[in-house]
Amino acid sequence: MKDRRLWVVFILLGAWVGIVAGQQPGDRSALRSLPRITDLPSSYHPIGKLADRGEFFATGTPLHRIDDGDAHHGLPATAAWATKPKDKKAQTQGAIYGVENGRITSAGYVIRQADLVAGKSFHGLTLRELEFPSAHYLTIDLIKGATEGSNQYLWLWHFLPQPDRVRPMLRAGELQSVTSLPRTFAVLRNDAYANDFYPRMGRHHRDFSTPANRLPGATGDDSLWYGEAAGKLIFIEYIFSQQEFAAGASWSYVPLNSVPIPPIDNVHILHYNPARSEAPGTFTTHMYFIPEETYLAWEKEPPGL
């Protein structure tokens, strides 16, 4: 009888280990579902390791993402962007891909620290050069250069979840209802815009019990924002302090899968000047599930999506 009980324990333990193993980021079935590095254009080539995040492929020069200037800050910048749409070549400029066993496990961009410190913005960063799945989390790592002026940041979106954050995600084009947000989320009120809808962006929702900005040492879903239009979630967002970038901070884990999301179509990293001269500037990182040309055309809320 005792031996039988031991066998039951071993069987249950084996099943538990199997479940946990099935949730590992390196899980073979999850890895096999990702695009191959050979699916990329032939111009992509290995560039070595970056920020202890594994091996990467990139194409062209410069390696870093070229900024979109600092002539405009905040919402007015989106009006300028709407007049200068980017073609596919411009959208993919500076794209880099993390590779594991021949599969693309992450996508991102290298951005110069000096450009962030100078308050320059970036838009049209595509995450759809290939049919990538939803990103589960974001990391932002400082890469130190030979001189302080050559420091760079690696912004990287990861397609495999961490072991303790395995969540279901959506397919491209599947937009969640805004009612899927936790009850702690509320609309950011702004009387300057009808129904709190920001032109060329959307309506913003967040949990006001957490800080507006994502701190480098934050855990969990602190400072998470979502964007909505016509009752559908259209972006996920975090805000980062310009001062933190100047100080060389890194963000080792920024979750994106608290609520199931579809694949991210494009990203913009938009600089906002401070409301008060003594306060630091910020960067809003909007990660949209819909094409840039769609939302940049909105001067008011669309009737439906």
Image (cartoon, rainbow, N blue to C red):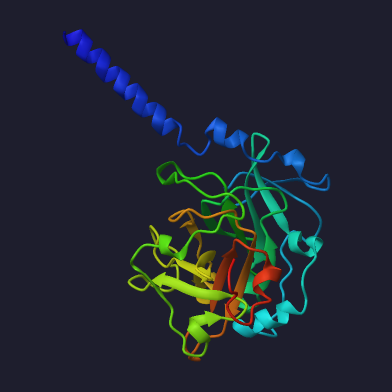
Q: Quadrant of the N terminus?
A: top left
Q: Residue furthest front?
A: 303
Compared across the picture, whether 54 is left or right of 2 comes to right
Image quadrant assignment for residue 181:
bottom left
Q: Quadrant of the C terminus?
A: bottom right
Decide: is 258 above or below 235: above
Measured as percent of width and height from the top left, residue 44 is found at 79, 47
Q: Nearer the viewer, residue 134 or 42?
A: 134
Determine if residue 235 is in view. no
Decide: is 225 above or below 276: above
Measured as percent of width and height from the top left, residue 8 is found at 26, 16
Q: Residue drawn 45% across and 68% down?
A: 214
Compared across the picture, whether 5 is left or right of 110 comes to left
Compared across the picture, whether 225 is left or right of 299 comes to left
Determine if residue 200 is in view. yes
Q: Nearer the viewer, residue 108 or 232?
A: 232
Q: Nearer the viewer, residue 243 or 238?
A: 238
Q: Residue drawn 29% across and 18% down?
A: 10
